[in-house]
Image (spheres, helix red, strand yellow):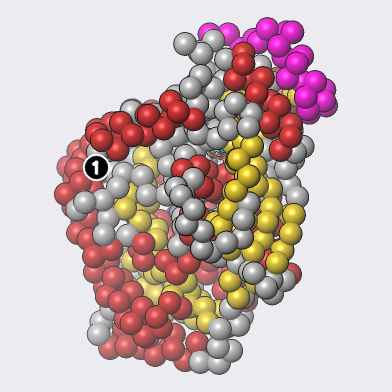
Amino acid sequence: MLDKPDNTLDPALLARFAAIVGEKYAITDREAQAPYLVELRGLFQGHTPVVLRPANVEDVSKILKLANETGTPIVPQGGNTGLVGGQIPLHNEIVLSLNRLDRIREIDPTSNTLTCEAGVTLQRAREAAAAADRLYPQLLPSEGTCTIGGNLSTNAGGTAAVAYGIARSHVLGVEVVLSDGRVLNGLNKLKKDNTGYDLKNLFIGSEGTLGIITAAVLRLIPRPRAVETALAGVPSPEAALELFGIATERTGGDVTSFEIMSRGGIDLVLQYGANTRDPLAEPHPWYVLIELSSQQREGTRILLEEMLEQGMERGLVLDAAIADSIEQGKALWRIRELFSEVQRFAGGSIKEDISVPVAAVPAFIKEANEAVTALIPGCRPVPFGHLGDGNIHYNVSQPIEADKAEFLSRWSDVNKVVFAVVKKYGGSVSAEHGIGLLKRDILPSVKDPVALDLMRSLKRLLDPNGILNPGKVL
Ligand code: FAD
Ligand code: ZN
């Protein structure tokens, strides 16, 4: 109903929207719009009559009120790092960019909270927390660009979720603009508040389809006094999992990252990633990046060494490098951070973001590898990710010499065989990136029908005119 075939908007209406933010912040120039219309993987190309860049919650409210009254669809956008196309205006919607809402409103070190606006980047939030001797524990490789609003709207996971949880665990309160322009002020600092339904959790993870998050109260924790990082070569995912068991048993909550990577992906990092080198003398079939963080100044290094030694005695660790400095730690992390990006050098890459119970990860990898190589002989699975969360980024590179477009045209066939294995182990087809456009058509086949029905009812209730990110998720 709201799809408009061309990328025009009635000029009088466009002028009313522009007047809210001021001409300078209503971008209609095609070239200036370009960065808002493409996403990193190049899977979706958007079109928009205007990108609106409001400066505050009042202007967001006015924009939504006008949009609701006139039936004008809106796509919220933060840092545009989302990986499922949720932030792209595929049907000529107005883009509502939140990145001028970039104030850190308050840090309260006693209550351990940081209150900031939606457009603050994750990196800035973490730096502000560090300046107050606190840690904001969400960590994504996209931290320099992604925003708090985007993190909460996608309920982002990341590389420290194994210890600290996903975005949802870091939020005490949110401020949300509803589709009719009303502002839900839920900016409280309370750990305990049982006065009815937990509305904030409706908006967290809703990918901009139920409301616009304009600010949040985030939970901080004490800054760790010791952080130790190691990269270990391991023979198999089974061994990696057993090592994870040893690590959690010995350190309790101090395992803050436990990331698995396959050798095929490491080869690409070493070949194409600038300033990288193999930290281990020999190649190994699999690798794990381990980070321990502790409030104790002493002892963490010894614990890590003992853990790796125990792993070696049991044949779980083939070799390992422990970072001796912050720089060395960063070099180990760089391998993990480049892991996904460099896969483009291996041609077409079909990407999945799945989760299974942690115990089922090795079986999942084995069976998914068998299934995709039976489907497309010669294809190269490059699984990696957050082993400690049971969340594997199951990527598959095209066979060498194959035609890229032809390979990518098999994306839904790959989905089918991989999701069958996910289903067998009671897993999820979208662990942390969300549904957006990429997985919208898959959702009905994997989601409980009653849950789907409730989701549709909530969407109708909160967005009766269908103006908020239409065609995404549902
Ligand atoms: P955008 O991409 O702009 O938007 C994402 C979605 O949220 C869209 O549906 C959009 O409409 C909606 N939205 C944005 N802001 C708001 C708002 N204020 N109110 C309402 N809706 C809004 N993700 C992980 O979970 N874990 C990872 O480890 C991870 N690693 C990544 C590594 C790289 C190199 C890259 C490029 C991405 C990675 N991502 C990861 C994905 C991405 O960074 C996250 O999804 C991030 O949370 C998106 O934030 P953003 O500000 O860029 O949001
Ligand atoms: Zn991830």
Determine whether 466 is above or below 175 in the image. above
Label 1: element kind = helix
Q: Ligand 1 shows up in which quadrant of the image?
A: top right
172 or 139: nearer the viewer: 172
Q: In the rendered structure, does residue 11 fall within the stretch colored magenta?
A: yes
- Label 1 Cα crowd, 10 Å radius (few <14 / some 14-19 / many 20+): some
Task: Work out which quarter of the rendered image holds the C terminus and state it.
Answer: top left
The magenta segment is 5-25
Query: Can residue 415 be seen by looking at this rendering?
Result: no
Determine whether 381 is above or below 257 in the image. above
Q: Main secondary structure of the magenta part?
A: helix
Instruction: Tell me: is circle 1 under 8 Å from ligand 2.
Output: no
Residue 218, given in percent of the width and then of the height, sits at: 60, 58
Residue 310, given in percent of the width and then of the height, sits at: 32, 88
Residue 338, given in percent of the width and then of the height, sits at: 52, 55
- Residue on which disc 1 sits: 419
352 or 456: nearer the viewer: 456
Residue under the point 31% across and 44% down: 429
Tell me the amino acid under the disc marked 1.
Answer: Phe
* Residue 8 in the figure: left or right of residue 412: right
Residue under the point 60% across and 40% down: 184
* Residue 56 in the figure: left or right of residue 294: right
Residue 276, given in percent of the width and then of the height, sits at: 55, 64
Determine whether 162 is above or below 30 in the image. below
Residue under the point 69% across and 53% down: 116
Q: In the rendered structure, does residue 294 fall within the stretch colored magenta?
A: no
Query: Can residue 56 be seen by looking at this rendering?
Result: yes
